[in-house]
Image (spheres, grey):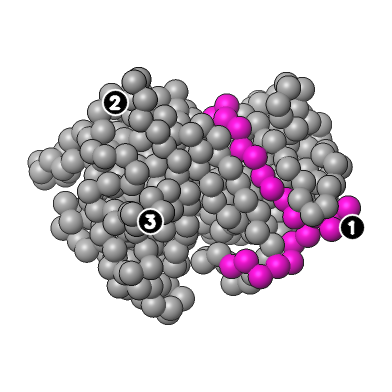
Amino acid sequence: MVRRIRSVLMRGGTSRGLFFHERDLPSDANLVERILLAAYGSPDPFRRQTDGVGGGASQTSKAAIIRPASAAGYDVVYRFGQVAIDRPEVDFRGNCGNLSAAVGPFAVDEGLVPAVEPFSRVRIHQENTDTLIVAEVPVRDGRFLETGDFEIDGVPFPGSRIRLHFVRPEGAVTKSLFPTGARQDRFTLPGGKTIAATCIDAANPFVFVRADALGVPGAEIEPFERSAALGEALEAVRRQAAVAMGIASSLEEAGRLNQAVPKVAAVGPPADYVAVNGRPVAAGKITLVARMMSMGSLHRAYAVSGAIATAGAARIPGTVVSEVARVAAENPARVVIGHPSGRIEAEARVAETGGGIVYEEGVVGRTARRLMEGFVLVPERLFAEGRP
């Protein structure tokens, strides 16, 4: 026996996930978690998710739960879930900025907000991080207009540009832009070497290290995919940062329960390299290079929340990101990040006040597409008491 649950499969930026109306899901949070795991085919020890809609990668194992907003200043409330691939876990901390690009189009097409031409301005309450995201959604004939000529690296086809404004993104999870109280900390690698790192919480918690401190050129891609030693080093930094940022109480907890946050990335100065699609990326066209890990694997594109955090860190003196970034004097708010699939551009507006740094707004352009709609099927036994 199976249970049919209405859902829509959407791509947002370089991520993909099931979108649900909150009203179509049970109120029991544990049951919702079991439903999402079954829908995606998790946990799968082979990391393929062949018994569900997941794609065996963190970017395709995400979910969005949407409801109308009741608080003034918002139109919809968006709850994000990162579905683990080989573990029976769904992490509802942090956010996926890429998937956020599909929230506005979903809200327009589902009648949750008025469809206003040429753009519907959708005010999204990102529930995980308790922040405001304003999406400018292209509209034609009462629906989201997905066709256009805006291209993003990591997606093979162009679409219409959705501008996402992350308003005051600092402290998304930890309630502080620099949760450790410093713009640089030092963490220990396996083997005993210590390196500098910047822990920042903007749109999502991130920890950044310099690639050269890890002994690799930042523009290379293969070591981040194939070197077990490099992966272990980055995970060691990530776990220590989780404890230092107050996200986990121990290194063990940081590895067992906190795979999704903080994210970890290695950064380096602009350099020429060849993206995974074979296209050259010119050093003169980017501000820095960055290689981000997601759920233990190299993110072959780049997270939007990562772009917001990276751009903000690039604009703030004293961070390891600012040390390698080459910000253009004529437009300092613009930060172009070279990632494995190409480039992602973000605008970061920061201001220095008597109380420190204020991250006023981060802006990115993304595309989105509605892929399928109907019902996801999950076993009826999930609705019995206890775990199956």
Can residue 152 be spotted in the picture? yes
User: Horizontal and vertical percent for residue 19?
Assistant: 72, 45
In magenta stretch: residue 143:
yes
User: Horizontal and vertical percent for residue 40?
Assistant: 63, 49
**Disc 2 vs disc 3: which is toward the camera?**
3
Vertically, is 247 above or below 266? above
Q: Residues within 10 Å of mark 3 (few under 14, many from 20)?
A: few
Extent of the magenta region: 129-151
Vertically, is 129 above or below 293? above
Which residue is identified by label 3?
330
- Residue 379's quadrant in the figure? top right
Which residue is identified by label 2?
180
Give the CA distance from mark 1 to mark 2.
49 Å
Which residue is identified by label 1?
141
* Sooner in the amino-acid sequence: mark 2 or mark 3: 2
Horizontal relation, residue 65 to residue 145: left or right: left
